[in-house]
Amino acid sequence: MTQALNSESLRQIGRETQPGACSCSLRPCAGWESFTEDRWPAGQMRQLGSLRDPEVYEPTQEEYHPDGTRYASPDAPIAVKFFPCNVSDVYACNNCKKVVLRYTEFGGYYVDHRVRELDPDLVV
């Protein structure tokens, strides 16, 4: 079973990790970045947990931007009860220790994988 994470545990994970240089295919991803599944470095990523609430069948699609940020803004808050954090899993790179949030967006005719690097100072 995947470990359920909340804002405090996410903040703690972010503060305990010291990412180093990495050659992974994700590149810098301060905001939510699209990536193709073939760019996901599966062999070096390990899942730390999930921000999904197993008790909530349909999580909110509402975003949290009290200071006027936008979805892909690098300084947008990481609000675990709001979209897209509330449908994300948390991974760490075994090589560089970078921690990322990952989710998949399903549209009518597409699948879009998204990833965002964890900045513990942005977790609300």
Image (cartoon, rainbow, N blue to C red):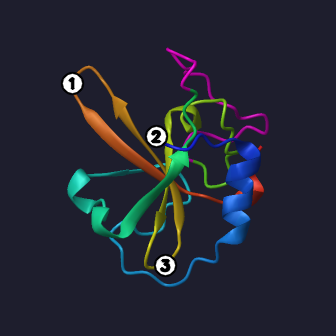
- The answer to whether 92 is drawn above or below residue 104 in the figure is below
Element type at marker 1? loop
Give the residue at mark 1: 109
Left or right of 26 in this view: 86 = right
Image coords of residue 26 (percent x, y): 38, 65
| Magenta part of the chain | 54-72
Disc 3 packing (10 Å; few <14; some 14–19; many ≥20): some
Give the residue at mark 2: 1
Q: Amino acid at mark 2?
A: Met
Element type at marker 2? loop
Residue 81: image tag? none
Residue for point 49% across, 78% down: 96
Image coords of residue 71 (percent x, y): 57, 39
Give the residue at mark 3: 96
Residue at mark 1 to residue at mark 2: CA–CA distance: 31 Å
Residue 77 in view of the camera: yes
Q: Amino acid at mark 3?
A: Cys
Secondary structure character of the magenta stretch overall: loop
Q: Nearer the viewer, residue 27 or 103?
A: 103
Q: Earlier in the sequence, mark 1 or mark 3?
A: 3
Q: Nearer the viewer, residue 12 or 113?
A: 12
Q: Earlier in the sequence, mark 2 or mark 3?
A: 2
Residue 123 in view of the camera: no
